[in-house]
Image (cartoon, rainbow, N blue to C red):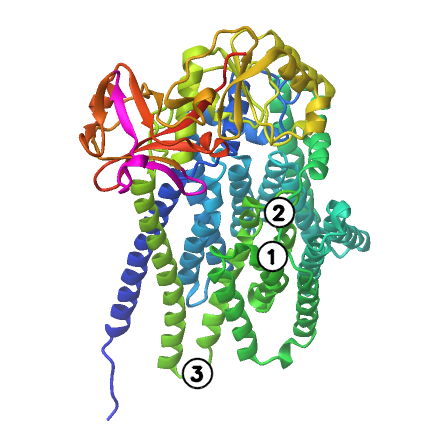
Amino acid sequence: MVRMEAPHAAPRASLALHVLFALCSLAIAAAGIAYAWLWMFSNFQLYDDEGYFLVLVRHLLEGHRIYDDVTTAYGPAWLGYRWIVNGLCGAPLTTDGARWQSLAAWILCAALVGLLVRRATIGQGCSRWCALGAAAFAVLQLEVFSNEPGHPQDLAQLVFLGGWLSFLYLRERRPLAAAALLGAAVALQGWTKVNLGVFFALPVLFLFLSNDVRTWLRACGGLVLAAALALPWLLMRTHLSEEWGPALACVVDGGLIAAAVFGSSLPRADRRAELVRVVTGIALGSVVCVGFAMARGSTLAGIWHALVVLPSRFTTELVIGIRVPIEASWMAGAALVVALLAHFGERRVPTWLLAAAELGFGVFTLLNVAPHREWLIPFVLPWAWIVLVPRETRAVRLPLVLCAPLQALQVFPVSGSQEALGTVLLVALAGMALSDACTALLREGVLVRTRRVLAIAIAALLVLDATWVLANHAGALSEYRQTRQERIALPGVVYTRFDEATGARARFLADTLRGSFDDFLSVRGDGSLYSWTGIAPATGVIISHSWKLFDDRQQAELAETYAKAPHALLLDNKGRIPAQLRASLPFFRMLERDYHPVARIGADDLCVRRGAPTPELRSCVVLPENLLQKPGAFLDVRWPAASIEDGEVVQLQVANLAQRALFADSTVPDVRFHPRLWDGAELLFDAQRKPSVSIARLAAARALRLELPQPIPVDQASFSKLRFLARDEKRLLSLPLVIAASAP
């Protein structure tokens, strides 16, 4: 008897898979958005790059000439984007506003990674599952967007991924339009950050030049490849004596050669028309970007100086090398040898071996996306060619594999966030490799039930693992926000929360500036304070990473401007600027001559003009220098002007958070270390007699004072905080101890 299956069984199973995929997609989207939102609004970095960009865009919207009057190394494409978003569309130029824009870019970039995987694996059985998993892991990879909200890297990644996606989707139907769009994307990224434009343009040009039958065009393709191979050595020419320099160059070159070897096997065709469209797209995009800058008053000389001359100085003044061991050079060589063997002996390589290699590449890459992303460049990048093994998808994937090695050069000269941004393509390639491995399990020769179980299990494991990681990270971040961070109630800061030390410092500086000063400058940057206080920058020279990058005119402009400012606060940091540089630059000579320090918080000195009245310090505990070594000192507590969430204070601490050192605590058994609060002569808080007091009562105090039982070590005092804690150890408020200098 022949056993017949019900005709509706297959559609029912297919419907179940569609429902399962839809549910997994919703779970990934919810977990990813929650994770990204929590991370974006819980991560304020003290180096405050986002403040730099807020100041820069403010200058742009006020009509200043960027590049000539306002210093920056970022291109006019990004300026035009911010002019549209913040100027024409009216998006708020605030701490929260920059974060909303970066959050949108973060989610869109992760979605584009998933779509790239889907396009390069379409027709394969587990394509959409692997694309969904890759998008989820891309959310983890791109968490670095929260380090510098508003950074041009947001736009650069969107343009890069969107340019390749539009090209791959349109190329079969409208090849000339696809090529023109790709050229425009190259121009937009290049006029956002010049180095990224070079890393994008070289693979694009090689892709079209190397596939033309004309000998001279193919020779041009060889020249482009030679330039790409020389680029990492040229960039790191002054760092070849360090272990990571030549190792990184070898890794990049090994990946490029392997990709070029596989690319040479593509069918030859006349790409001249597409090449012309690419070049046309680059040219038109460049004209639009440069035209925008010139329409805003910039000159070609100013653009050249800012985008080419200044970055070349940067690569010699500030270099933070990536961790690439010298053994990575041998790894790159081994990967290249295996690539050559696989290319020329492809038919003799067992199918299961290639599938296992792709599976290993994909799993190893995705498992190291979040915890060890610095491993991706030395140990994964040389093997990116593995996704070019299937001939039927090689033409679609080759552009991405060609781009991957040069993208890794983003880590030079400063790594950190760039380690993740330079390896985003590896996440997409890992998704493609996993899809290939799953497809290999669906081929002839394997039992039907077994192959389906294995393939679906691998894809489902990928998606479930990504969902679990995102959900757990989101939960941990949510708990962290509730227990370790707080809102600091500053203008433009509604959703963003700060860690205790950074938030206390920000509130103190913002409240003090608004109360006594018209001008401000910090030698370390602190650009967000302009947004929080409404104080306009007094000069177009924006302080950021290195004072060595300013030319003589800019150095003189800084000194002259603040020498004439009658009510300016200059935030100095002696550890930030070497003594030799302080002695040579006119600004620091002026600072030494015309200003003197009146207070200190952490490593920063608050300096005001000599002869000016002592400013009122706010949102802090004032510790006069002459009381540093005296026990039982009474210190003025300056309550924040903004409203603080009410609650009962049951514990007081005076602590150095960085070193986890307690100097006073109302809960310790030894009463000699119990701090007390007074309102004039009235005792408000004492662990023995008045063990609780409300925030409302403290805010209403006319002369709130802290009785400090024991002196704090001199080197610890300016880094300490007064903490107000509730019964559940929830922190209600943290105020910094600020050392007030004695009168000169």
- Stretch of the chain drawn in magenta: 656-680
Q: Secondary structure at mark 1?
A: helix
**Front position in the image: 716 or 190:** 716
For marks 3 and 1, the one nearer the N-term is 1
Q: Secondary structure at mark 2?
A: helix
Tag 2 near tag 1, CB within 8 Å: yes
Tag 2 near tag 3, CB within 8 Å: no
Question: Which amino acid type is shown beneath numbered disc 2?
Answer: Val
Q: Is residue 618 above or below residue 429?
A: above
Q: Kindly give the residue lying farthest to the bottom in the view shown.
A: 1
For marks 2 and 3, the one nearer the N-term is 2
Q: Position of residue 657 (x, y in %)?
A: 41, 39
Assess disc 3: are there few (<14), some (14-19) or many (≥20) residues with their C-alpha within 10 Å of its C-alpha: few
**Front position in the image: 66 or 743:** 743
| Residue that badge 1 annotates | 377
* Residue at the image position 50 percent from the left and 28 percent from the top: 51
Q: Position of residue 295 (x, y in %)?
A: 61, 18
| Residue that badge 3 annotates | 446
Question: Which amino acid type is shown beneath numbered disc 1?
Answer: Ile
- Please identify, in this view, whether the residue under mark 3 or under mark 1 is nearer the observer: 1
| Residue that badge 2 annotates | 411
Q: Secondary structure at mark 3?
A: loop
